[in-house]
Amino acid sequence: MIKINFKLGNVDEMMTRYQQLLTYIKSAVTRNHSEKSINSILDYISTSKQMELLQNFYETTLEALKDAKNDRLWFKTNTKLGKLYFDRGEFTKLAKILKQLHQSCQTDDGEDDLKKGTQLLEIYALEIQMYTAQKNNKKLKALYEQSLHIKSAIPHPLIMGVIRECGGKMHLREGDYGQAHTDFFEAFKNYDESGSGRRTTCLKYLVLANMLMKSGINPFDSQEAKPYKNDPEILAMTNLVSAYQNDDINEFEKILKTNRKNIMDDPFIREHIEDLLRNIRTQVLIKLIKPYTRIHIPFISKELNIDTEEVESLLVSCILDNTIHGRIDQVNQLLELTRTSHSVDRFHGLDRWTTQLNSLHTTVVNKIA
């Protein structure tokens, strides 16, 4: 009756029936039967998009469980309520839930009870998501490392997917692109195993990390990722990789514009697009200036499809990190390139070699004479 009323949208009747059901858990039915029934209802109701209804449902359940002493059901309901608070961005309320959940998995000494490894990982996953959303990398890093050291658990792949995805985001923000790539790949495999829709999102993040680490390896060459290469949601990222690896800046920018929804609507990807653009512009710039000793900045601007101020900013950055050796003549809008120490050494070496050959030639001629 509860599920039927939920499907029909009869919220008041559904809550009345559910409250009646909860009165039976104390003595009328066995512990296992009541737990199974309530778990089934909680999972069914959790599909609702009505946040207030879900909150009311979970809080009503927790109130009834105060005297029932059913720890597993209490843990599951609190976890669902915590996830709801996370989705709503109510981090203060979520922190209180996490504190209660942590206390339920501690020894008498106040340490984490490693015998409850599976439950601990569920708590860590929720807490890690909160720190990721808050961009609190210090706490996130400590908890992430802690979660990977729990060996007593048999976690659901979905939980490990969440932990690895958040770890990937943390490492990418730190500029550790290699580790981010590893984390996103592990997250993708876990999501794929659990059948979660997050797998396609994580595959996009994997591609992002792959480009930022300037890898020449196509991420879709792996056995796990290959089946998704032509997925409509992934296709834009596939094309983006191709343009990036070919240093085709015009095609790269065109793909970004025409696939805004699939790429730019994701806040995390959008956060790193500027880094990608800077990388590809730098790669094109290096190829462009290679034959020259002097080159006009407006010409570079035209080739890179950015204004002269952005070109100057890019040139300054490249000169400071020694990617380019030269100086900017702002008055004449010129980039003047200088020989690198390697080129100078090579020139001096050739000069010495030429001098020695001339000396040898003179000696031989004198002997013949």
Image (cartoon, rainbow, N blue to C red):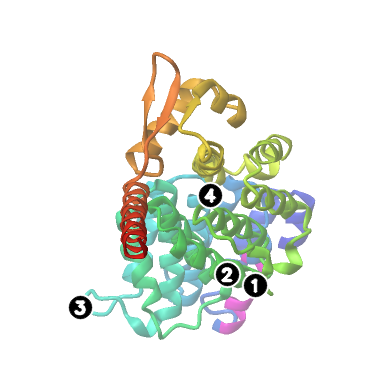
User: Disc 1 residue type?
Assistant: Ser
- Is disc 4 placed on a helix, strand or loop? helix
Q: Quadrant of the N terminus?
A: bottom right
Instruction: State the extent of the magenta-drawn residues as a range.
Output: 32-42
Q: Quadrant of the C terminus?
A: bottom left
Q: Could you tell me how far apart the alpha carbons at marks 2 and 3 are, in whole angstroms?
A: 31 Å
Magenta region includes residue 64: no
State the residue position of label 3. Answer: 109
Image coords of residue 261 (percent x, y): 69, 40
Does the rendering let one see residue 84? yes
Sequence order check, earlier mark of 2 and 3: 3
The answer to whether the residues at label 4 and label 3 have Cβ atoms under 8 Å apart is no
Q: Could you tell me how far apart the alpha carbons at marks 1 and 2 are, in whole angstroms?
A: 6 Å
Q: Residue at x 60, y 25 (%)?
A: 302
Q: Could you tell me how far apart the alpha carbons at marks 1 and 4 are, in whole angstroms?
A: 21 Å
Image-based side of 36 in relation to 343, left or right: right
Q: Is residue 300 above or below residue 214?
A: above
User: Disc 3 residue type?
Assistant: Asp
The answer to whether the residues at label 4 and label 2 have Cβ atoms under 8 Å apart is no
State the residue position of label 1. Answer: 194
- Is disc 2 placed on a helix, strand or loop? helix
Q: Could you tell me how far apart the alpha carbons at marks 4 and 3 are, in whole angstroms?
A: 33 Å
State the residue position of label 4. Answer: 87
State the residue position of label 2. Answer: 158
